Image: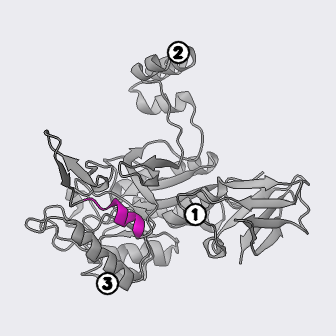
């Protein structure tokens, strides 16, 4: 049996940051603390350009090339076109953005919709995923903000679903009471809904009473109107706590302990560069409560309890993990391409991956074979401290 996460990690954590409002001096403070002092191997999100006249000094690749010292696996759309006045967005802007990505050797795998951007895919607007529009007479028009085909062309396979979840930890089942306790205004109502959840069986009535419980998967396939199929992923947090001050609260040590206890994943929704209005004049950017929460995460990471990585690394791992097939009678482990993220699984796709399994004496570890697409893969095998667990890492 495959373990949920590479041994000995019990959970997986990452941050999906929106770069809105970030000033370069605050970016430098964040970089110095999170990436350098704590050595947390997170990825980051970028605006390629920013035309936002209300945020004229907002960090973006064109004006602040120093941000490339970090690894960026996420695009926050094609740039900030909110409050852009005469610089309205057009598909040609996306084509220009792709050329910039190529020149800078940036290969994003993740897309996050931005505010009320007209070219969003799921959040506030869906016009970015619809090739054509129609008027009331049925006349067809070209949609010049459609870019989902370009998004896929650039290598992006993961799209934020436009929502945030308050459940601590995805990639796990949620009990009825835990879900209703989060959603209901009182414990009494949560208990009533939990009881009704077990009694009511008719689907239409369950939907009417709000009894449907989400599957709480970290990712799920989504078919867009243009026929493209990509993965959506869930972010954890709250709308009101989505700044550098709220971050300390939503990733507090007690919540991280719960994440580890739940043996689950967390993709945090936040704006690392944003502060509340009342904190704008302070000379420092990161409050102590947030520093302490991030230090706790760093401690758990370095103690090998909590895996920390870029978002795309987490999602790639989950996709491959969920498509591994075990054939102990043949002493074979097969990595099957999912067809959305991986049409084929190549040796290079596995260079940073580790998969751990319970042994149970069903495999001959000296002669085990790992294959994908009917081709053998090169790997190293290690029996862990617990002799009932072995791990594969790839060369």
Secondary structure of the residue carrying tag 1 is: loop
Q: Earlier in the sequence, mark 3 or mark 2?
A: 3
The answer to whether residue 263 is seen in the rendering is: yes
Residue linked to disc 3: 65
Secondary structure of the residue carrying tag 3 is: helix
Quick check: 144 left or right of 199?
Answer: left
Quick check: 150 left or right of 344?
Answer: left
Q: Earlier in the sequence, mark 1 or mark 3?
A: 3
Question: Do the residues bearing badges 2 and 1 touch, measured as CB atoms within 8 Å?
Answer: no
Location of residue 30 in the rendering, given as x and y in whole percent from the top left corner: 38, 72
Secondary structure of the residue carrying tag 2 is: loop
Which residues fall within the magenta stretch? 146-153
Q: CA distance from mark 2 to mark 1?
A: 42 Å
Kindly identify the residue that appears in the image at 46 percent across and 70 percent down: 43
Residue linked to disc 2: 200
Question: Does the magenta stretch mainly form a helix, a strand or a loop?
Answer: helix
Quick check: 103 left or right of 319?
Answer: left
Give residue 182's quadrant in the image: top left
Residue linked to disc 1: 343
Q: Earlier in the sequence, mark 2 or mark 1?
A: 2
Q: Is residue 255 above or below residue 373?
A: above
Q: CA distance from mark 3 to mark 2?
A: 57 Å
Q: Nearer the viewer, mark 3 or mark 2?
A: 2
């Amino acid at each position: 049996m495959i373990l949920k996460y590479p041994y000995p990690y019990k959970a997986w954590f990452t941050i999906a940051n929106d770069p809105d409002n970030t000033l370069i001096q605050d970016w430098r403070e964040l970089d110095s603390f999170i990436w350098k002092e704590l050595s947390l191997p997170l990825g980051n999100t970028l605006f390629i350009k920013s035309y936002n006249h209300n945020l004229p000094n907002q960090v973006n690749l064109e004006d602040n090339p120093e941000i490339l010292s970090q690894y960026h696996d996420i695009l926050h759309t094609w740039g900030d076109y909110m409050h852009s006045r005469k610089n309205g967005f057009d598909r040609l802007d996306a084509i220009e953005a792709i050329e910039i990505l190529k020149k800078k050797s940036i290969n994003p795998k993740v897309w996050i919709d931005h505010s009320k951007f007209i070219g969003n895919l799921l959040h506030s607007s869906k016009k970015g995923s619809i090739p054509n529009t129609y008027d009331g007479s049925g006349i067809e028009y070209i949609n010049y903000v459609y870019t989902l085909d370009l998004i896929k062309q650039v290598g992006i396979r993961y799209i934020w679903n436009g929502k945030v979840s308050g459940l601590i930890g995805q990639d796990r089942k949620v009990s009825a009471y835990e879900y209703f306790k989060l959603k209901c205004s009182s414990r009494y109502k949560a208990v009533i809904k939990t009881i009704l959840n077990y009694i009511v069986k008719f689907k239409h009535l369950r939907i009417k009473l709000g009894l449907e419980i989400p599957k709480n998967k970290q990712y799920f396939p989504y078919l867009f109107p243009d026929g493209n199929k990509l993965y959506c992923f869930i972010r954890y947090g709250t709308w009101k706590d989505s700044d550098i001050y709220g971050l300390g609260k939503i990733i507090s040590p007690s919540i991280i302990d719960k994440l580890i206890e739940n043996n689950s994943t967390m993709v945090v929704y936040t704006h690392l560069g944003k502060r509340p209005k009342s904190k704008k004049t302070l000379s420092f950017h990161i409050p102590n409560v947030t520093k302490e929460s991030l230090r706790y995460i760093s401690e758990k990471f370095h103690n090998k309890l909590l895996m920390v990585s870029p978002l795309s690394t987490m999602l790639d791992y989950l996709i491959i993990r969920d498509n591994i097939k075990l054939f102990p009678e043949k002493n074979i482990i097969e990595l099957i391409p999912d067809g959305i993220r991986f049409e084929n699984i190549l040796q290079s796709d596995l260079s940073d991956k580790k998969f751990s399994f319970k042994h149970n004496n069903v495999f001959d570890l000296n002669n085990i074979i790992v294959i994908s697409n009917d081709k053998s893969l090169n790997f190293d095998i290690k029996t862990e401290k617990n002799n009932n667990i072995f791990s594969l890492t790839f060369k």
